[in-house]
């Protein structure tokens, strides 16, 4: 069943940024865009991605004589009035926004953020005044908030069927997030956030993709249909203002994220045109997928005896179909994932064959061949079991886990490592955990990174000499043990 809204209903979803936007910018005089990036630990792999994409975009804009994107970073989304004693200036987003609007001359600021931090009403009022300030000869200022962070992105559509606790979501209704929606209302901007149902009174301030086909979300929105199509005037408005595209024409919210699928099917930062986007996605994917060799990783693990664990899960039918292609190109993202996995597994086998007799190292493999992707196999997580065996039988001092983290229970990108079982295996023995998850197969979930740091180990991201991967380290934390059955 196809579904489209009548015109009056559609108008309720239009971005109000069109109102009062004179004088209009033109192709010969496009508005200037500023991007503010939240670089807090919650953002994860999005930080290096944005850094790389901005450099690529600015190089293209410079080559055609267009206004380059002004770029700033800030460690969270704390917000207060100027001179606040509660929020230091270095962490107050108000100052970065003022720099972009007033010093850099931005007409629109695109803020990519988890919206975590300490916010005060005085800060919201100050930003509202900043947005209402008019500059002669320039269009009305706008703030576009892309509320996005790694955990939410990796949750995908399960955010609807298995919502997180309210404290995990800054826009959960129980957190009274109306200040954020009110900030971008009345033509001041728009909120972009996947897998959420906004408050009814602020729906005109929320940007939807062209299509939503998730039945659970549509039911929560009160739409008794299998799919719904939304007005995308907000995309057209931004494209006209900045001669840039902010989303692909037919883009939908991602259900599961692997590095390759995310880069090739979703948009994080604006782009010039489809050809430019294809070039950028290919280049950025290649850079994010670059990593140090397994041997280089291991050289940075100080331990007398290291357990090297290669753990990979896959769906058998995908490998069978890939073999049938005999090297021919495919547009099926699952087969592309299987091809990436095949290359990575071949690398681990070469390492195992070359280093099988190395002293001080115990190399183990854990492969999970799944008959289908939706149902997780019965029994404990094979990766955690293999790690426990290295601890118990081989008395290793550290474990280097090289994995895609997939054990079924959903499409590739669904992370299924039993972190409680893994923590049980290493914590009492004092074994340090080091994790490497190839970006095109991952990325590594933040909870697994926290576990590794809590153990005294670490996580290898990208290449050691790539400054774009220099990001905020998440706080060490052991996973919370599951509640005992029948506990009150």
Image (cartoon, helix red, strand yellow):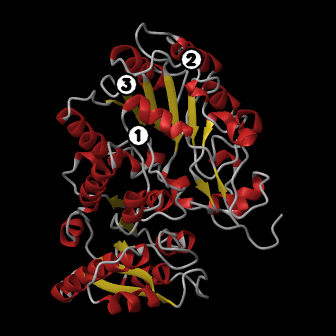
Mark 2 Cα shell of 10 Å, populated few (<14), some (14-19), many (≥20): few
Please report whichever mark, 3 or 2, sits nearer to the chain's N-terminal start: 2
Q: Tell me, yes or no, whether the two marked residues, 3 and 2, touch with CB atoms within 8 Å.
A: no
In the displayed structure, would residue 38 be above or below residue 352?
Answer: above
Task: Find disc 2 in the rendering and name its residue.
Answer: 20
Which residue sits at x=38%, y=41%? 270
Please report whichever mark, 1 or 2, sits nearer to the chain's N-terminal start: 2
Pick the front one: 82 or 384 = 82
Give residue 390's position: percent from left, percent from top: 39, 83
**Closer to the observer: label 1 or label 2?**
2
Give residue 66's position: percent from left, percent from top: 25, 29
Quadrant hosting residue 294 = bottom left
The quadrant of the rendering that contains the N terminus is bottom right
Please report whichever mark, 3 or 1, sits nearer to the chain's N-terminal start: 3
* Secondary structure beneath label 2: loop
Quadrant hosting residue 158 = bottom right
Quadrant hosting residue 32 = top left
Task: Find disc 1 in the rendering and name its residue.
Answer: 39
């Amino acid at each position: 069943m196809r579904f489209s809204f009548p015109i009056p209903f559609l108008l309720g979803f239009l971005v109000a940024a069109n109102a009062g936007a004179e004088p209009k910018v033109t192709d010969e005089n496009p508005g200037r865009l500023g991007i503010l990036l939240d670089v807090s630990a919650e953002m994860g792999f999005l930080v290096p991605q944005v850094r790389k994409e901005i450099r690529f975009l600015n190089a293209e804009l410079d080559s055609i004589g267009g206004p380059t994107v002004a770029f700033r970073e800030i460690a969270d989304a704390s917000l207060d009035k100027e001179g606040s004693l509660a929020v230091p200036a270095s962490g107050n987003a108000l100052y970065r926004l003022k720099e972009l609007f007033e010093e850099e001359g931005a007409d629109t600021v695109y803020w990519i953020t988890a919206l975590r931090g300490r916010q005060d009403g005085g800060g919201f009022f100050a930003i509202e005044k900043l947005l209402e300030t008019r500059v002669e000869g320039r269009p009305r200022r706008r703030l576009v908030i892309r509320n996005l962070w790694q955990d939410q992105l990796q949750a995908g559509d399960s955010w609807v069927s298995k919502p997180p606790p309210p404290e995990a979501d800054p826009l959960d209704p129980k957190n009274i997030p109306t200040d954020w929606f009110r900030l971008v209302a009345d033509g001041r901007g728009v909120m972009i956030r996947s897998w959420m149902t906004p408050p009814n009174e602020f729906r005109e301030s929320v940007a939807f993709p062209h299509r939503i086909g998730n039945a659970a979300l549509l039911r929560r929105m009160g739409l008794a249909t299998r799919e719904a199509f939304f007005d995308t005037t907000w995309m057209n408005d931004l494209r006209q203002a900045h001669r840039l595209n902010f989303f692909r024409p037919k883009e939908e919210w991602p259900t599961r994220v692997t590095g390759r699928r995310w880069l090739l099917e979703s948009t994080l930062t604006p782009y010039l045109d489809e050809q430019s986007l294809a070039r950028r996605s290919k280049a950025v994917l290649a850079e994010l997928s670059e990593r140090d060799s397994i041997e280089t990783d291991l050289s940075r693990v100080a331990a007398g005896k290291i357990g090297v664990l290669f753990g990979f899960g896959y769906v058998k039918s995908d490998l069978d179909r890939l073999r049938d292609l005999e090297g021919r190109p495919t547009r099926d993202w699952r087969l592309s994932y299987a091809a990436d996995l095949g290359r990575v597994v071949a690398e681990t086998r070469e390492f195992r064959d070359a280093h099988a007799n190395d002293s001080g190292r115990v190399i183990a493999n854990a492969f999970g061949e799944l008959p289908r992707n939706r149902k997780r196999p019965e029994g404990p997580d094979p990766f955690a079991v293999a790690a426990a065996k290295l601890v118990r039988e081989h008395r290793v001092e550290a474990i280097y886990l090289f994995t895609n983290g997939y054990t079924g229970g959903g499409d590739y990108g669904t992370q299924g490592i039993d972190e409680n079982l893994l923590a049980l295996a290493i914590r009492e023995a004092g074994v340090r955990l080091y994790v490497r998850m190839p970006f095109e197969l991952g990325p590594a979930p933040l909870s697994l990174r926290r576990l590794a740091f809590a153990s005294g180990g670490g996580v290898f991201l990208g290449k050691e000499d790539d400054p774009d991967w220099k990001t905020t380290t998440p706080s060490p934390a052991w996973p919370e043990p599951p509640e005992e059955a029948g506990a009150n």
